[in-house]
Image (spheres, rainbow, N blue to C red):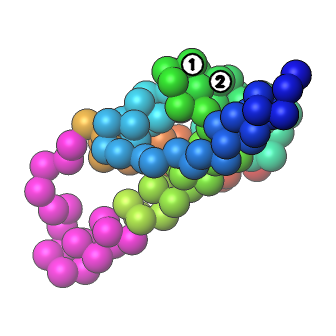
Amino acid sequence: MSVLQLEENKKSLKKSMVWSKAKDLILLKEIAAEGVMSNKPRSRERGMQWQRIADNITALGQGVTSRAVRDHYNVMAKKYRARMAQEERSTGEGGAELTEAESLLEELIHIEREMERQI
């Protein structure tokens, strides 16, 4: 491998994923399809599922790691929980109708909570 090829490989690895609403939806669909939340947190099975999700997203043309995928989901879930709590406090009920991504996220959070209760 030449020096030029090594430099190109380094540049391609350093590009970070820029998440968009469309990519968020793809991520949430992948998480739901893999059934990640149905396994215990920090289990080998869950780790392998995060890796498969990262591989599937990488196959779409954007390289990501399993950690990046997992961290992005956790950030999305945290923001969603905070927004829903704020809406509930301000209106006393849920807000406007949920988008497809929000309903998927809500379902995944619910499954995750159920799994944590079983532990």
Residue 55: image tag: 2
The picture places residue 86, in percent across and down from the top left corner, at 29, 76
Tell me what residue is drawn at x 38 percent, y 60 percent.
80
Q: Is residue 70 visible?
A: no
Q: Is residue 104 left or right of residue 114?
A: left
Most foreground residue, 108 or 26: 26
Q: Whole-Å distance between the Cαs marked 1 and 2?
A: 6 Å
Q: Camera-side residue: 78 or 9?
A: 9
Quarter of the image holding residue 90?
bottom left
Which SS class for mark 1? helix
Which of these two is toward me, 112 or 118?
Answer: 112
Which residue type does callout 1 highlight?
A: Ala
Q: Say if 70 sits above or below 50 in the image.
A: below
Q: Is residue 87 magenta?
A: yes
Which residue is under mark 1? 59
18 relative to 80, above or below: above
The amino acid sitting under disc 2 is Asp
Q: Residues within 10 Å of mark 2 (few under 14, many from 20)?
A: some
**Residue range corresponding to the magenta coloring:** 82-99
Quadrant of the rendered structure where residue 24 is?
top left
**Do labels 1 and 2 touch, CB within 8 Å?**
yes
Would you say 106 lies left or right of 78 here?
left
Quadrant of residue 34 within the rendered picture: top right
Residue at (48, 41) in percent of width and height: 108
Furthest residue toward bottom = 90
Disc marking residue 86? none
Q: Secondary structure at mark 2?
A: helix
**Residue 13, horizontal then vertical, whole percent:** 69, 40
Residue 51 placement, left or right of 101: right
Q: Where, quadrant-wise, is the N terminus in this rendering?
A: top right
